[in-house]
Amino acid sequence: MQAVGNTFIKLSSITLLTLSVSLVGCQTFKNLTGGADVDAVETAQKSEQSYYNDAIEQLDKSHHTQAIEELTNLRTFYPTGQYAEQALLDMMYAQYEGGKYEMAAASAEQFIRLYPSNPQVSYAYYVRGVANMQGSSEGLKLFKMNQAERDTAYLRIAFANFQELVNKYPNSPYTPDAAQRMTFIYNQFAESEMSAANWYIEREAYVAAANRAKWVFQYYPLSESIPKALATLAYSNEKLGLTDLANEYKTLLQINYPSWLTSDGSVKLETKRDSTWLNKITFGKLGRSSVDDESVASGNYNGATKTQMIRNASQLRLPSANAASANAPASNAAPARGTNGNLQNSQPPRGITQPNQDAPIIP
């Protein structure tokens, strides 16, 4: 009988506890543990329409944190509602404008994964690239310092993002600006190599400087650094006493880029950074995604039509990170020289081509 009584008492306790939870509802467990109130299940405070309207109002006021909060609540409480997809598009914009670049890229990646058939999916591809181009650090701004003198790992990711957009959605309104950004990144990688070559020249490490210039010819043949690379090869070989080889490069300069030679045939080699590319480029300003917006990413396409810009960018390729680290000379050691005294693999490049009317004439 005692056992039965104990069982009854235990069952009664469980029943009372269950009734207590039911009376509390979905708001809080109150005083069950002797502590403060703890939210059990949060419920929507507003309708889906209200969340979205309030989020847009906050965006219009540039209150990005508040907008993100409203959009997050909308997607939490109405994950399959009519505003769910647009809310994620607006969220990535709010995160980008608020300087949360890593979060913006992640939201764009989520949208691409969840809504691949959405008519505005190309916007997500674009935002992902732009956000990665800015870098994951909130304090990193594109034009605050020369990109070629910084770690460019994040630029490689952005380049791949834009390349995917250009290949998949060539007719997207965001593609021309993505193509221009690809060209910028490509030139930045080439300039990074030439910055290293300048460093070697200033220290009279001419073998290493020439090898950096050759790397540009091999992997960045469509870059704006080609004339400087050619001048570096001519200058470095001349300093090494390899007169015949230096004269071959001077001949190429005379044919293709005569402004890099003086009247007496000397090389005009400027080792200071040339920022003309940064001065010429104008990226499109990222705007909110809108079905009615024909192009919120229109930039300034100097010297080429949008079609030409896209076509040219589609030809650009970056060497793999492994190839770059394996083949680029170390900063504290010059590359080996051949047994005949010449630079290894340092013959003048042949057949250089560029997709414009200024393509060099190489014998």
Image (cartoon, rainbow, N blue to C red):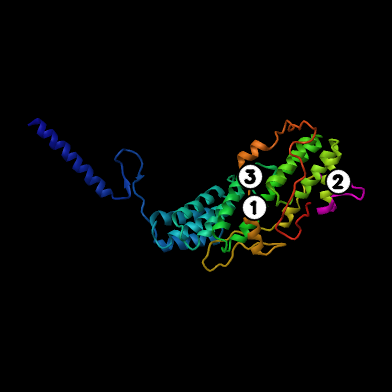
Inspect the image, locate mark 2, and give the three-letter code of the amino acid beneath it: Val
Per the model, the C-alpha gap separating discs 2 and 3 is 29 Å
Name the residue tied to disc 1.
316
Ranked by sequence position, the earlier of labels 2 and 1 is 2
Compare residues 76 and 299 and report the one nearer the observer. Answer: 299
Per the model, the C-alpha gap separating discs 3 and 1 is 10 Å
- Secondary element type, mark 3: loop
Residue 319 numbered tag: 3
Q: Can I make out residue 112 in this image?
A: yes
Inspect the image, locate mark 1, and give the three-letter code of the amino acid beneath it: Leu
Residue at far right of view: 264
> What residue is at 62 percent from the left and 61 percent from the top?
176
Characterize the magenta stretch by its predominant secondary structure.
loop
> What residue is at 64 percent from the left and 60 percent from the top?
311
Q: Which residues are magenta?
A: 254-270
Q: Residues within 10 Å of mark 1 (few under 14, many from 20)?
A: some
Q: Taking 349 as reference, is 45 above or below it?
A: below
Q: Can I make out residue 98 in this image?
A: no
The N terminus, quarter of image: top left
Compare residues 326 and 79 and report the one nearer the observer. Answer: 326
- Secondary element type, mark 2: loop
Name the residue tied to disc 2.
267
Residue at far bottom of view: 292
Q: Residues within 10 Å of mark 3 (few under 14, many from 20)?
A: few
Per the model, the C-alpha gap separating discs 2 and 1 is 29 Å
Compare residues 197 and 38 and report the one nearer the observer. Answer: 197
> x, y percentage for residue 257?
82, 53
> x, y percentage for residue 72?
45, 54
> What residue is at 75 percent from the left and 56 percent from the top?
359
Compare residues 109 and 71 and report the one nearer the observer. Answer: 109
Ranked by sequence position, the earlier of labels 2 and 3 is 2
Q: Residues within 10 Å of mark 2 (few under 14, many from 20)?
A: many
